[in-house]
Amino acid sequence: MKRRGQTLVVFALTLLLLVLMVMMTLSIGMKVKEKMELQTMADAAAYSNAVATARAFNSISLMNRALMGHMVAMTGVESLISWSGYYRGSIHGAVEAYNMASLPYVALLSSCTSNPALCKCATKALLDIAETQKDLQDKERDLKGDWEGPDKDAGEEAKGLQISSISKEQQDVYTKLTERVIDAGLAKKIVEEAQAGSRFGEEFVAQVSKVNKRELEGGWGCDGEGAACSRRNAGRKLHFVDAAMGSRGYPFVTRRGAGDPIKRKLQTLLPDEDRVMGVSNEGSGYFPAEGKKTHAANPIDATEVWADDHGNVRIQFNRGDSPCPRSSLGTGSAESHVRSNHEGDSSDQHQWTGGGDEDAQHHTMGECTQCPGMWPSHMDYNYNLVTRDTDNWGQPKNYAVIQRDYGKRPPKRADPWNLFFRFRFSPSREAVEFDNSGIKLSEVNGGTDISKATALSAGITYYKRAGPHWREPPNFLNPFWRATLVSAHVDEQGKNEDVQAALQAVAPFTAEAYEALKKKGYEGW
């Protein structure tokens, strides 16, 4: 008896098994592909955040360098103002030197009754000295008209070098950084690009992470936890001021000693026979505390900008007649300084030996941001963080959290191989549902909504100066900020709380899974 169809049954069963295997392979492969796509988007967002932060920090650092360069140039202008005043002070120093040079002739007047010749030549010498002193004083007064215009212009030049508008430029850079990183602007842009290639519309979502805000925002006066903050409190010593003081490399600003030009000019004011033997000069430009005329280390805090000059003028009187001494030496002291403060402060000064500006307020600097003080507002690296090795010395990490919402896909159109099954495995023959579409767990497993796949990635902006400078702490003085991807556990906060908090805010189920894996010792973070 012929039996037909056995092979067909075996073939049908084999084909069913083959179809199920293909479907399973496609399903797993698609899930892996989609997971890789999601993680790649998160990595791209985290790295982009880190790059944007590095570029912003480098821009802020370059602007700070420009600010410091202008402040150093300001000390140069202030030094020139003070040195110019020192010339006027040296004229009065010459008058004082003539007073000393006249002492030998004054002593000879006591012999007028006994030695008329000595009396005569001593009297003549004193008259010559007095006439020369009057001429010097007249010439110093004649300078006033030629002085006031350039002096005012020089004060305005120093004020203009303060460029307080740099603070606004830095704030603009930081505002853009806030939009891109703290408000997830870059991540949202990446998501928008991905949406354009998706078959299912608005299935991707970029979440905002509070970690990014905390890691970046240092607040006013560096009272926050983040890396970038505005100018430090006025009562704290500023490393920006220290750096500016150390950058005044030109000798004329730091230790002038520029007496020879004044000596040559002063010689033209004296009678041909008399000689200016020397004009000594010491001076500097600096940023002291309020009212402190010194450039020693402790009072430097940029409340004011000063420049001062001081030294001596040595004159040789050579017009004595016999039997009186032919020559006589005299020394007089000379000083000058300019003191500039912020607008609204009336303590500005420009003084020199024998005189000073009647109105020194044209030397006033710009409006103070933390009064008293004339140093412009600027952005600074949070100095509170540079000792915290467990927090990466304050170098900011960022989290990018991207989600794919499978619930946004149309039913029965998403993936044809992700099927819905109803199995009957229980003794009562009740159906046990198995939803292979990945939207929700069964009631037996808690009915948890798992429709949103979540990927988290971490990036960091770090400070690294090429060469043997690895010990240099992070700062906003040099543009050596870089970016890379890192483990989400790159610091203590990330390991202990940040990852869970970031996931809990957008996907509690994912946060629970993370904690369960962490408790089991999984370290792939």
Image (tube, grey):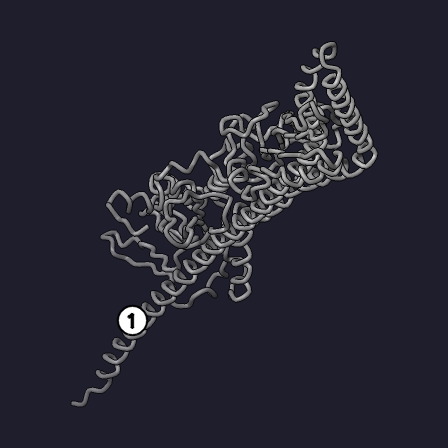
Q: Nearer the viewer, residue 231 or 366?
A: 366
Quadrant of the frame with the N terminus = bottom left
Q: In screen coordinates, is 296 left or right of 416?
A: right
Q: Nearer the viewer, residue 415 or 405?
A: 405
> Residue 141 appears at what percent x and percent y?
80, 29
Q: In screen coordinates, is 231 left or right of 11?
A: right
Q: The residue tagged with tag 1: helix, strand or loop?
A: helix
Query: Residue 230 sits in which quadrant?
Result: top right
- The residue drawn where x is 59% and y is 41% is 252
Crowding near pointer 1: few (<14 within 10 Å), some, many (20+)?
Answer: few
Q: In screen coordinates, is 92 left or right of 42?
A: right
Query: Residue 152 sits in which quadrant?
Result: top right
Amino acid marked by disc 1: Met
Q: Nearer the viewer, residue 25 or 8?
A: 25
- Residue that protrudes farthest toward the bottom in the picture: 2
Whether residue 341 appears in this view of the structure is no
> Residue 352 appears at what percent x and percent y?
69, 27
Location of mark 1 (residue): 21
> Residue 235 appears at what percent x and percent y?
54, 25
Vertical position of residue 118 compared to residue 390: above or below: above
Q: Nearer the viewer, residue 298 or 58?
A: 298
- The residue drawn where x is 71% and y is 37% is 267
Vertical position of residue 385 compared to residue 41: above or below: above
Vertical position of residue 515 compared to residue 437: above or below: above
> Residue 145 appears at what percent x and percent y?
83, 34
